Amino acid sequence: MRTEGAPRPTACPDPLVGRRILVAITGSIAAVKMPLLVSALAKRGAEVRCVVTPSAAALVSPVALASLSRHQCYLDADQWSPQAPRPLHVELAEWAELVLLAPLSATSLGRWVHGLADTLLASTLLATEAPVVAAAAMNTSMWQAPPVQRNWQVLSTFERVLALGPAQGLLACDRQGDGRMAEPEQLLMALESVALWGWQRDWQGLDLVVSAGPTREALDPARFLSNGSTGLMGVLLAQAARLRGASVHLVHGPLQVHPGLLEGLICTPVQTAAQMQAALMAAQGQVDAIAMAAAVADHRRVEPMAHKLSKLALGDLWAEGWEQVPDLLAGLVASRPPGQTILGFAAYSGDGLAAAREKLRHKGCDWLFANPIDQPDAGFGSPGNQGWLLGPGGQEIEMQPASKLAIAHQLLTALRPPQLSQPGP
Ligand code: CTP
């Protein structure tokens, strides 16, 4: 599998290449994670500048940030240089196309929400018109303190801001609870999402169920039948919908994606098609849309072997004792409530468009995304995808090679249920 940080084939452009990204770091211990994130952005071809508060500069080295971003790291002492023709906070605010504010401490949150401009970072935040991805990180009690919660509520009403609340885990203060900064993989994904789509929450108030990853059918206690799906496409579809405001339930088989990419999703992990079917049927209820991105293994043993087979005995297994797994998508279509939109996926190799048209017809879903798995920049584990989205009334939308997150946003735009009033960009 190619990992998230691996170089991308040129046919699948990285949405962060050439973007001017201001990384604003405030005083939380999670600041120690930022140099590697800055390095990841620079390696992906983004132009990066860093600005730190005095407390952040005590936690993480401005020299390291300067070195990894290939540019001076800005401190409060730089703000009013007699050599500068324009105020630095205005220069930085206007330079930035995107701002990553991470970690966001209780103090810096309070400053921003109350319009205070007493540090370089605080005044830059007030002066910028660029979208901001903000990730809070602090001690659990501080996070839960009513003034911080009030400030966070106010922040969530700001335009142009994608606010990522803290995750649960073991904190540096030895507390177990809410307070961890979103994982760097989550922050990179959120930045990429804002670069592609913006901050509009056009799925706000909607419920979406996404299935992702392969299923596994046991042959014996040691072996299983499965496929090469990593689940990345489904996970990114779920995350794109979440960042656009949807409440998302992800039902997934064994994934090969960074666990940080699951943050913020309601997840139900499963192994077999039967477990996936039960979870999907239980979740189907009144949700507005379902996306079946899972690569369901097609066959299973009628009775899996109770004991591990020898390799010779394994050879005899193929002849008999198999059954087809039920078609989960067809079952969801048959039991759907009125108004529910259903998207199927169809992985193909060779020329799959004619087969995809037929698949849309016989599966009975509203939309079908047919994507090749034999192209160099698409398919299982690749950061990119492409294909055809077939939809109601004979619609056929060709999707050019793009990052999986970009494809996810295009799918969500096509799928957006008609009752939604607020269009995106
Ligand atoms: N699917 C499903 N249940 C199955 C097999 C597939 O719900 N048992 C769903 C997949 O999640 C996908 C769609 O059906 O959304 C198409 O999957 P695909 O593997 O392309 O089709 P199959 O139905 O397996 O048909 P075939 O392999 O014969 O082309």
Image: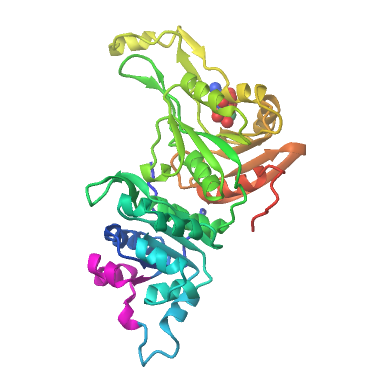
Image quadrant occupied by the N terminus: top left
Residue 350 rendering spot, x and y as whole percentages: 58, 36
User: Residue 41: in sight, yes or no?
Assistant: yes
Residue shown at 67% from the left, 33% from the top: 340
Residue 223 vs 249, above or below: the answer is above
Quarter-wise, where is residue 46 in the image? bottom left
Locate residue 400 relative to residue 154 in the image: left or right.
right
Question: Is residue 8 in view from this perspective?
Answer: no
Task: Name the outermost residue toward the front.
Answer: 146
Residue 96 image offset from top left, x and y in percent: 47, 72
* The residue stretch that appears in magenta: 50-78
Quadrant of the image containing the C terminus: bottom right
Residue at the spot x=45%, y=71% of the render?
Answer: 125
- Rendered image coloring scheme: rainbow
386 and 163: which one is in front?
Answer: 163
Left or right: residue 93 versus residue 306 is right
Residue at image position (66%, 44%) is 416
**Does residue 337 lie above or below 107 as drawn?**
above
> Residue 147: x, y in percent?
41, 58
Residue 254: x and y, percent? 40, 31
